[in-house]
Amino acid sequence: QTTYVVNARAPHLYMVSRDLYGSERQWKAIANWNSLKAPYDLRPGQELVIKKAPTLSTAEADALLISTWEKMDRKDIAQGIAQIQEAPAEAKVEAPLPEPEPAVAAPAAVAVLATPPPEPVEEAAAEPTPAPEEKPKAEVKAIEAKPVEEKATHHRHWSFKTSLVLSYFNLKGDNSELNVNNSLVSDLDYGIELEAAYHLSERSELLLGASLEKMDIHPPSNGDEVEGESQYLGRFMVGIEDQVSPRVTLAAYGIYEQTPFVEPTTDGVNVEAIYVPQLEVGARWKFVEKGNFKAWFITDGILLLPTSSHGFDLKTGGGWLAGFKFANQFSKQTLTYGVSYRDLRQDTDESKNSLNTVYGNIGLIW
């Protein structure tokens, strides 16, 4: 068992896990060893108990953290680590971990894992070096002078997203009483989506969203007259996403969305857009992470709650959604884009209704 002193090279649990073990997988174990609870905030100088021996050497840990911070466009932190790594041996304090070549002093940035025992310190001091009391001050100042924790983790910060939405859908309504089957298709509809995310912790965020989409709908070929063929559809959403592992994020949303339904008339059909409350739960499976590019596969189940409006008494319905989401991270913004397919079914006593939709979107997060 040893200790790890939190500083700017690894200001949160994910990065501490990378520093010690080369990946983020041990963050939960570190939290458990130290009885940390959500939102798992760390403070500079906080000592963490480490019960499992680190698997990275000093040089490997430095190289990994430098690469990670550079990918996150935090070159100031990467340069701080590199400067300490390149500093003369006299300015460094030996790490407590055994090194294959004891003649080479360990980089000072990793010396925070534990307080070195008196004997190694005295041996290192045998050479003409500055007083031991001055060494930690020089190391800490090299990085911790730069306030980076909030920017690196986004804790307690808002982010915002605006997206252009495109969709195409097929709407079917089969009325058993009138023995009428109606099928309508849309043009390539378009709209705008606004979303705000409040970062609850390193891995969880609260989402608030609203969108407005222009709908133009008509029969597949010239035929019946369609009333309400051109409308605007609104959608409101509140949800939460929780990253349970580096590869899997669970999601749950409450949605209030206008959904089109078909009503037969004497000379055609009438399309009514009805607000339907929905519950949507699912997962985002990250299958690509290369540099600033990431990709997820999305799988969601949808529950449509019963409601009454415009003469429709809608029963409980359901459906599913599947798709892909992509993200390219830049210095201050993230470009997101994706495509998905959604299948919804919600009936009344007189008719069976289905809505199949293909969605595409592209947007910016800042």
Image: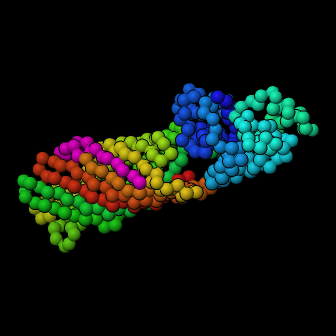
Q: Is residue 327 above or below residue 83?
A: below
Q: Is residue 260 above or below residue 243?
A: below
The x, y position of residue 186, in whole percent, is 28, 65
The x, y position of residue 40, in whole percent, is 56, 33
Is residue 358 something one can see in this rendering? yes
Is 298 a magenta residue? yes
> In the drawing, does residue 362 fall left or right of residue 43?
left
The x, y position of residue 129, in whole percent, is 90, 38
Is 343 a magenta residue? no
Q: Quadrant of the N terminus?
A: top right
Q: How is the image coloured?
A: rainbow
Q: Main secondary structure of the magenta part?
A: strand
Rendered image quadrant of residue 233: bottom left
Q: Residue at x 63, y 31 (%)?
A: 50
> In the drawing, does residue 172 fall left or right of residue 67?
left
Count of all numbered marks drawn on residues in the image: 0
Q: Is residue 114 above or below residue 89?
A: above
Q: Is residue 94 above or below residue 261?
A: above
The x, y position of residue 240, in whole percent, is 43, 41
In this view, the residue in front, 96 or 166, is: 96
Q: Residue at x 54, y 33 (%)?
A: 29
Q: Residue furthest front?
A: 100
Q: Residue furthest right?
A: 128
What range is drawn magenta here? 297-317
Q: Residue at x 16, y 71 (%)?
A: 223
> In the drawing, does residue 44 fall left or right of residue 311?
right
Rendered image quadrant of residue 109: top right
